[in-house]
Amino acid sequence: VQLVESGGGSVQAGGSLKLSCAASGYIFTSCAMGWYRQAPGKERELVSGISRDGTPDYAASSMKGRFVISRDNTKNTLFLQMNSLKSDDTAVYYCAACRKAGLGGYVYNYWGQGTQVTVSS
């Protein structure tokens, strides 16, 4: 299984970025997916999740209304549209695939290498 994120970069506060995650090595539609992020000195946090059929099923409260998760099952690709970016959104963003229920929430089996998003104020 390989997950490759792209689309990160530097942007000014208020701007937008769209992250992509290209998946390979498994049947894309067999797995739910998600986006996580980890800021310097902070724990990794779940940003958003999406079911196998493309229904978003989780969004962190601090990002609701600004970030939109989607997937294209014909292209084996996951997306995260990020709008109205704030300096607090600066982090490495990770794509994750194939989750199962665990203590305290879902546990994902596969991870990408991450893409840096830097928001300057």
Image (tube, grey):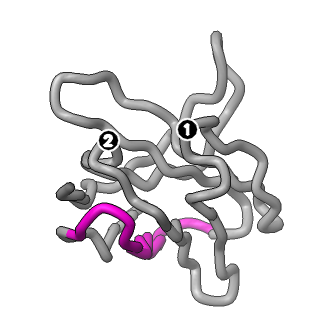
> Does the magenta-highlighted stretch encompass residue 31?
no
Q: Residue visible at 43% across and 55% down?
A: 95
Counting from the top left corner in percent of width and height, residue 33 is at 61, 54
> Does the magenta-highlighted stretch encompass residue 14?
yes
What are the residue bounds of the magenta stretch? Answer: 11-27
| Mark 2–mark 1 distance (CA, rounded to whole Å) | 10 Å
Residue 66, compared with residue 17, is above or below; it is above
> Image quadrant for the N terminus?
bottom left
- Report the residue marked by disc 1: 62
Residue 57, compared with residue 82, is above or below; it is above
Label 2 Cα crowd, 10 Å radius (few <14 / some 14-19 / many 20+): few
Describe residue 45's horizontal placement relative to residue 117 as left or right.
Answer: right
Counting from the top left corner in percent of width and height, residue 107 is at 57, 29
Going by the numbered disc 2, the residue's amino acid type is: Asp
Q: Residue visible at 66% across and 70% down?
A: 70
Nearest the viewer among 64 and 95 is 64
